Amino acid sequence: MRLHGLTLTAFGPFGATQDVDFDALSSAGLFLLHGPTGAGKTSVLDAVCYGLYGAVPGARQSPGTSLRSDHAPAGLPTEVRLELTVGGRRLEITRRPAQPRPKKKGDGFTTEKAQSWLREYDPENGWQALSRSHQEIGEEITQLIGMSRDQFCQVVLLPQGDFARFLRADAEARGKLLGRLFDTRRFAAVEERLTELRRTAETQVKAGDEQTLAIAQRIAQAAGPAAGELPLPDAQPGEPGLSDGVLEWSAVARSGARERLDIAESVLAAAESRQAAARRELDVARELARLQQRYEETRRRATELEARRPDRDGHQARLERARKADRVAPALELRDEAERAYRAAGAARERTRAQLPDNLADAGAEQLAAMERRLRQELGGLDAARRAERRSAEIDTERAELERQARADDELILEAEGWLAGWESARRDLQERIESAQESATRAEQLAGRLEPARRQLEAARRRDALATETAAAADRLAAARERALGAHEKWLELRERRLRDIAAELAAQLVDGEACKVCGSGDHPQPARAGDGHVDKAAEETALDTYRRSEQIRTEADRELGVVREKYAAARAAARPAQARGAGAEGGGAARAAGAGADD
């Protein structure tokens, strides 16, 4: 706000008209109002306040007091005209308080009502009247300056000890006033954000201290007696100096443990040397014992074989006899068959003789033979020859089959002897193959038991990667929703401010000639306010408010969605960790879980 000029007429101690040119005073920068007591310094400030708000500060506005100068002529009205630039607009405010004036007809005085005028300077059209309503002018000035009369008096004028009263006010009252004056909402948001970051940092520091203490406990367990040389710091998580104390203690424990480790390594090296020597002696003794056992086993087997030699010789003799018998078996069978054939021929001869005629019943062999030859010749000698030939072929075939069987038996005997000779090595090979197969089966069962957890872990890892991408996308959506909500909120506030600035024009649009004004009650509307460029009506403001509420709802939904996705991602990441890692995490306790949660955030 910048003051340009002030005109006082019959105001306070000034009985005539006084002009104050603030442009000339402020051309050199600062200026000072000074003078003796009663010179009117405070009255100038009162006139500025009255021109802006239609009232003066402090008790000078109490009932029964008058702003009119006692030195002014009766026909000179009390008036204050203030010209200023505020909010980029050059305005002129003229105010007259309620005051007595001479009656136009007759003698005496009548009380004239308070009046106010507001004009704005247009570079093209000059001064333009805006309003004559006290309420409209007051709202317009309050909206442009951003302070009420009391706040303006406390912050700008500070007259008659009011500054001290402002300083003695509580922090809440001063905070509300200064926040309204300087629009500290952004700073409050920054303060709230910094407070949230501070709490988060405190939580992370406390979690880190807890993890540090847990690691120190594990160091103490691992260091053993070396950790007892210096006690652990008794500071609680979050207290200053805990990390330095733990580092100092761990350095001492590490030095003691390293010294004990060097001693143990020396003792271990000596013990390992003695163990290596004892192991070599043990290997020599075991090799000697093995050779002695093998020698005893060989002697025992030789004794057993020697004792079983008669049985083997008997079996060998039987085998030889069986082989010889097998060779002559076909001849014996042939002899038996020939005997059977001879007996059958004798029986057939007897049957044949029985069938011979009586004259040939006692015939000799020669006679029968001659008879036979003759009959053969008569019946034909070809059939007998064919039968003899067929029989001879059958005998040859049987003999060849018997020879083939004899050769097969010889090969079988040789194969059995070779198989018996390599039985021990074959048995060892088969035993080794059985053991290898058993080991393979055991290994296959173990791998089969580990396959399903590995598959579940792989599936969880895939879900984790997908949820990581989804988490990043949800975070981006939340950031975009926040930006849109913030933009919608700022736009709504801007439209609301513009509507309040032009509220006089909106109220003037509802005025009807002859009907009383809802604000001042007057039935005359000589100069109703007109809407300026960019006027915002109530529908536009409500539309902006609805847009802001929808944006805020979308932001809340995006925030909730991000929380759900983060929970799913944390569960998938925990499931995707190997069993060893999960075991280690469980051993770490709550500190590890707190650190992991901080890293996820």
Image (cartoon, helix red, strand yellow):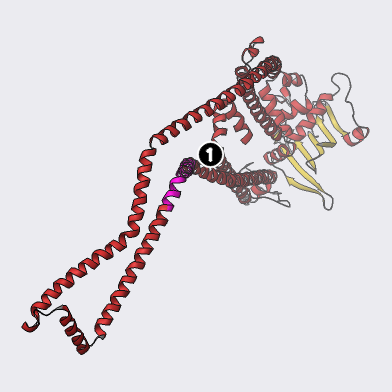
Quadrant where the C terminus sits is: top right
Decide whether residue 580 is among the magenta residues: no
Q: Residue at x 41, y 35 (%)?
A: 306
- Toward the right, the furthest residue is 28
Q: Give the quarter of the image for residue 70.
A: top right
Q: Which residue is at 79% across, 35% downward? A: 79
Q: Looking at the image, which is closer to me, 273 or 124?
A: 273
Q: Position of residue 573 (x, y in %)?
A: 57, 39
Where residue 26 sits in the image (x, y, percent)? 90, 33
Vertical arrangement, residue 135 with respect to residue 293, above or below: below
Residue 336 sits in which quadrant?
A: bottom left
**Residue 601, visible in the rendered structure:** no
**Secondary structure state at the residue bearing disc 1:** helix
Residue drawn at x 56%, y 27% as measured from the top left: 287
Q: Residues within 10 Å of mark 1 (few under 14, many from 20)?
A: some
> Residue 523: x percent and y percent?
63, 46
Instruction: Return the residue nearer the eye: 240 or 499.
Output: 240
Q: Residue furthest bottom?
A: 378
Q: Is residue 138 above or below residue 36?
A: below
Q: Please say whether residue 417 is one of the residues in the magenta stretch.
A: yes
Kindly tell me whether residue 288 is visible in this rendering. Answer: yes
In depth, the one of 131 and 397 nearer the eye is: 397
- Identify the residue position indicated by label 1 in the image: 575
Rendered-image quadrant of the N terminus:
top right
What range of the chain is rendered magenta?
414-443
Left or right of 337, for residue 402: right
Q: Position of residue 301 (x, y in %)?
A: 44, 34
Q: Amino acid at mark 1?
A: Ala
Magenta stretch, main secondary structure, is helix
Left or right side of 466 for 345: left
**Which residue extends farthest left?**
358
